[in-house]
Amino acid sequence: MINKKDKNQERLARHKRIRNKISGSGERPRLSVYRSLSNLKVQIIDDEKGITLASSSTLSKEISGKLGGLTKTEQAKLIGKDIAEKAIKLKIKEIVFDRGGYLYTGRVKALAESAREAGLKF
């Protein structure tokens, strides 16, 4: 019998390996990405204190109105720009990028490049 691999279990295993090596601090917090089939959520997290400093999502009220007619990749660019602006307001310029075990392509790459263009360094 052929066993089909569960892609989400593989992603979670990659995410655990990544998280063993990186963590966010007060001066360089972690930008965590969660990608579902239809939505994208990002958080800037200080792992030392265990708090979320800023977050953005395709489901948030301030952004969901701007998303009509955009592709998922274009939505990711909008989210990247939004989270970078929020980080800069909090005087955060450098972050650690946590792709959450997702491959660095498509929406994750678009989000990262958009955040870099808006002023974040990672």
Image: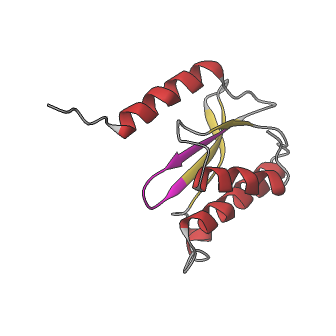
Viewer-closest of 15 and 95: 15
Q: Is residue 64 above or below residue 119?
A: below
Q: Position of residue 81 (x, y in %)?
A: 74, 60
Location of residue 3 in the rendering, given as x and y in whole percent from the top left corner = 22, 32
- The span shown in magenta is 31-40
Q: Is residue 69 left or right of residue 37?
A: right
Residue sitting farthest toward the bottom: 69
In the image as oriented, which residue stretches furthest toward the left? 1
Q: Is residue 86 visible?
A: no
Q: Residue at x 59, y 56 (%)?
A: 107
Residue shown at the point (64%, 27%) measured from the top left: 47
- Occupied quadrant, residue 92: top right
39 above or below 65?
above
Q: Is residue 108 magenta?
A: no
The residue depicted at 67 percent of the width and 23 percent of the height is: 48
Q: Main secondary structure of the magenta part?
A: strand
Using the rendered view, name the quadrant where residue 26 is placed: top right
